[in-house]
Amino acid sequence: MLSTALVALDSTVIATAIPTITADLGGFTQFPWLLSVYLLAQAASTPIYGKLADVVGRKPLMLAGIAVFLAGSILAGFAWSMPALIVFRAVQGLGAGAIMPMSITIAGDIYTVEERATAQGYLASVWGVSAVAGPLIGGIFSEWVSWRWIFWVNIPLCLVAGWILARSFHEKVERRPHRVDYLGATLLTGSSILVLLGLLEGGQAWAWGSVTGVAVLGGGVLLGVLFVLRQRVAPEPVLPLWVFRRRILVTTTVASLAIGAVVLGLTSYVPTFVQISLGTGALVAGFSVATMTLGWPAAASLAGRVYLRWGFRSTSLLGASIVTVGSALLLLLDDASTPWEVGAFCLVIGVGMGFSAVPTMVAAQSSVGWSERGVVTSANMFARSIGSAVGVAVYGAVVNATLGAHAGHPSGPELATAVHRVFVGVVAAAVLLLVAVLLMPRRDTTSERTSTAEQTVGGAA
């Protein structure tokens, strides 16, 4: 739970500190990269960690992820320029790529389906609370101390998490020879980087229809196609294609992608909107989006009981419907709105997330055994990271295109117009979540039980 909190916190903690960071380092138009590069590095590395976890075990990868995340946090705190900070954020993301899927996979290993209702509820609550509390914490540090402490505060937390894991977590793994699909990993990383680069810089560094724009996006798509072809023949694929042939896994993966896009759309732009358009301080801006922390954990704690009785699909459908309604309410906001209105709408979305994030993840995990759970969990988290990264990239492109020449120093009404278009994108992502949940199989796996044999084969204690 502590490790999950670190990863989720750092995906959004920068949001309210952006004005302070850019005032110190410059480069306001580059700030979307601070969010996207972290998510991109996390997304690109997650499938690799997931595959290795099914071969060498969860514990060594979790410890390695914490170590890399710690190094990135220390370096980010000493960043001397915006490009340097972007690079160090990428290092953090590489560590996060191991931590997030491993924590959820470990929970899937050591708890039965019934017990996971509580355990995954805790983890989802921690993820949700940390992700939306990030802007609040970032506001406190940037306003009262220094933005650099946003990263340095991770140092003792990483050390404690690593110590507890090394001391208390024990697992039994069947060792066997394995071959890492380095080519597949390279193709996946290259594709993700080019697509994200095209979305972030399109319309800014080059025109969308220019040779450069077409080449960058086209190159990303081409590498993506080559990655798929590689996975069909690789002895041990990074992301096995069977994941995309099972309806329950496809629908829950798409749902996870949409969840990432919705959450990052809010945590990335709501604090900036509240500060610049509504004229508040960083602390108030953080509180406005942090109201999601009230609804998310409360709903997540109830979700386990609900899906054990009514099933994964019904519970997820309830949550997705609430998220869609809450997202639609955001369209009512403008520069004359109040932080209270913003907070109320974020609270509604938080409740919906609590009822949708947990059931979709547990449904995916419950459909496979130990030897496949790492891949399935990492695929789900990969989708959430990609949804977050691409979402932030698209939202950033929309904001920069709307502001145009005023992107460096937007006024309140100008930013309100730009963020309104971001909210339209958030609504679109919420609708995608709703559609994905509607397409989930009606036959739930809530009646499945984790056998003693399965827990022994890769089990942990």
Image: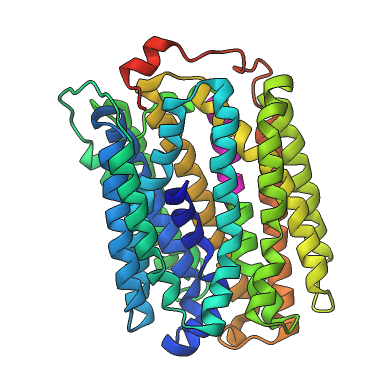
Q: Residue at x 84, y 78 (%)?
A: 336
Q: Residue at x 23, y 31 (%)?
A: 56
| In-front residue for pair 205/369 | 369
Image-based side of 185 in relation to 294, left or right: left
Where 342 falls versus 226 (above or below)? below
Q: Note whether residue 191 is visible.
A: no
Helix, strand or loop: magenta stretch:
helix
| In-front residue for pair 335/298 | 298
- Give the percent coordinates (x, y) of residue 415: 69, 79
Q: Quadrant of residue 315?
A: top right
Image-based side of 349 in relation to 173, left or right: right
Judge whether residue 115 is colored magenta: no
| In-front residue for pair 235/176 | 176
Image-based side of 352 in relation to 109, left or right: right
Which contiguous range is marked in magenta? 249-260
- Give the percent coordinates (x, y) of residue 365: 49, 26
Q: Which image quarter is the C terminus in?
A: top left
- Give the percent coordinates (x, y) of residue 277: 73, 81
- Give the percent coordinates (x, y) of residue 424: 72, 59
Q: Residue at x 37, y 49 (%)?
A: 97
State the colouring used for the structure image: rainbow
Where 424 falls versus 221 (above or below)? below
Q: Note whether residue 95 is visible.
A: yes
How many dots with numbers?
0
Judge whether residue 255 is colored magenta: yes
Q: Quadrant of residue 377?
A: top left
Q: Residue at x 32, y 27 (%)?
A: 232
